[in-house]
Amino acid sequence: MSNLLIEMMDKVFDTIIIGGGSAGCVLANRLSENPDHNVLVIEAGRRDSWWDIFIHMPAALTYPIGSRFYDWRYQSEPEPFMNNRQVYHARGKVLGGSSSINGMIFIRGNPLDYEKWAKDPGMESWDYSHCLPYFKKSENRTAGANFWRGSTGPLYLETGPATNPFPVRADEPDHKLIQSSYPKPTLISLPPYSLTVIRGANKK
């Protein structure tokens, strides 16, 4: 038994979080902002070591995905409408979870989906306008804040250096709409992706 484990057994924790994936790490970070609140995170996977290029170099994502050292390598049940084919699901087996082995592309989801959910009884506050302030609160956009994006949160976001050769939308050829990757709910657009990357390294 390691000395660290023995030391932890002698401590009393206010909160124990099982699973150090994306949600578990965010929850632990928020709870531990109070120095008087002791938090223990238990993760079955490997450490997120600073020297591990397979985690911290976004272009290396093809190495951890499918590797038994980084990936739980889940398979779905046979899908009856897909000729009983099983679908592979890469799930991160590492501190940080699947955010440590994916391509770092940050997408909130289609705003129209939020509007649809808000029509269900008891879900009125799940519309996009209610969720947007919380999205912005979590973000630290290196290009600065705007109506759609935040710049004071813990999650770093960069926009890639490549320019978009296509118009943002058919009737907006001058590319003036928004560079935030999140258009108004009624628009179909081709904006640049946001990435959870800063200076070329994974910052999930």
Image (cartoon, rainbow, N blue to C red):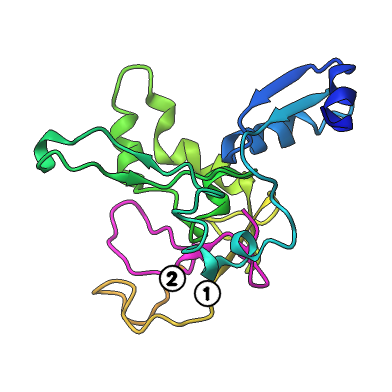
**Quick one: 96 or 108, which is closer to the camera?**
96
- Residue under the image location 45 percent in, 66 percent down: 193
Give the vertical position of 78 relative to 88 (above or below): above
* Secondary structure under the numbered disc 1 in the rendered image: loop
Which residue is disc 2 drawn over? 192
Quadrant of the image occupied by residue 128: top left
- Residue under the image location 28 percent in, 71 percent down: 169
The answer to if 168 sits in the magenta stretch is: no
- Residue under the image location 25 percent in, 32 percent down: 77
Left or right of residue 10, residue 14 in this image? left
Q: Main secondary structure of the magenta part?
A: loop
Residue occupying the far front of the picture: 1
Left or right of residue 154, residue 150 in this image? left
Give the vertical position of 175 relative to 88 (above or below): below
Which residue is disc 1 drawn over? 160
Q: Amino acid at mark 2?
A: Pro
Residue 35 place in picture, x, y as percent: 89, 29
Labels 2 & 1 near each other (Cβ < 8 A): yes
Residue 74 place in picture, x, y as percent: 39, 40
User: Marks 2 and 1, how far apart in space?
Assistant: 7 Å
Residue 197 place in picture, x, y as percent: 61, 64
Q: Amino acid at mark 1?
A: Gly
**Quick one: 200 or 167, which is closer to the camera?**
200
Give the vertical position of 12 relative to 180 (above or below): above
Magenta segment? 179-204
Query: Which tag, 2 or 1, sits closer to the chain's start?
Result: 1
